[in-house]
Image: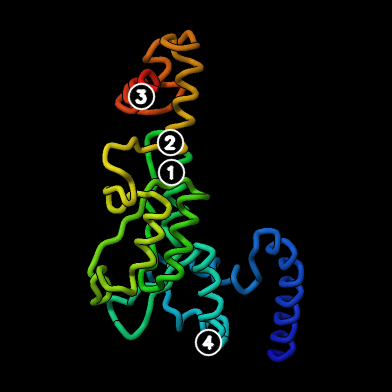
Amino acid sequence: MLTQKSSLVKKAALEADKVQAPILQSYDLTVAQYKFLKKLYYSPKDSVRVMDLENTFSMTHSTAIDILQVLEKKGYTTRIVNPKDARSKIVSLTDNDELYAATKKYPGRFYGYATLPVDDVEASVIELERCIKELGFVGVMINGPFDGHFLDEERFFPIFEKAAELDVRLNGKQIGRKAGATFITKKSIEAKKKIIELSKDFNGTLNDTDCIKVVGISRNAFYKYKREIKIS
């Protein structure tokens, strides 16, 4: 009886995978990748090791690593050294997408700084580019030393080169920008357009207080943008 029930469960799981596959494909995910993400989503933060994923889904270490490498390149997950056991690694969903949700909820008030899986330089470069170009982040936070390695080691250079190429801030300091140049973001451009359209100092009818509320930015940002608009 138990064998028959196990067979039915396995058959149902396979049928469910067939139904999920085309839906997940529209999100550029495979069924296996989705199962990993679901496991991480419903688990306490920083509690899932690579070996836990292997055991949960009955797969080899190399298969699990292949899936994780794809998820990392897509910016969904990151691996860090387990602080309780340096021989293993913790797998977590990236914080960047959560931060992006906050910046969208409060436009003009919060600006994103990317966090990166620094131990995987290639994945870090890909995630940094995604955060800047797709999520609209303005910089990246990297703190060292990392896993016993200092960030001035040559292995980490591609991360800094990508930051300079993208012209972003590193821990609050601008990388690759000439001294005295104005720091411009997509959000500041959008906010300035709204100020020009709505403020009575330009093309609109709203006073400063009402304009700040409608545009949804802080008072300091509003007056800073006004000055820059008048100068330009």
How far is the residue under mark 4 from the one under mark 3? 54 Å
Mark 4 near mark 2, Cβ–Cβ under 8 Å? no
Q: Residue flagged by tag 2: what amino acid is it?
A: Tyr
Above or below, 189 against 203 in this view is below
Q: Residues within 10 Å of mark 1 (few under 14, many from 20)?
A: some
Query: Mark 4 or mark 2: which comes first in sequence?
Result: 4
Quarter occupied by residue 151: bottom left
Q: Residues within 10 Å of mark 2 (few under 14, many from 20)?
A: few
Badge 2 element: loop
Badge 4 element: helix
The residue carrying mark 4 is 62
**Residue drawn at the location 30% of the way across and 48% of the way down:** 174
Q: Residue flagged by tag 1: what amino acid is it?
A: Ala
Is 141 or 175 nearer to us in this picture?
175
Q: Position of residue 25 (x, y in %)?
A: 70, 64
How far is the residue under mark 4 from the one under mark 2? 41 Å
The residue carrying mark 2 is 106
Query: Mark 1 or mark 4: which comes first in sequence?
Result: 4
How far is the residue under mark 1 from the one under mark 4? 35 Å
The label shown at residue 102 is 1
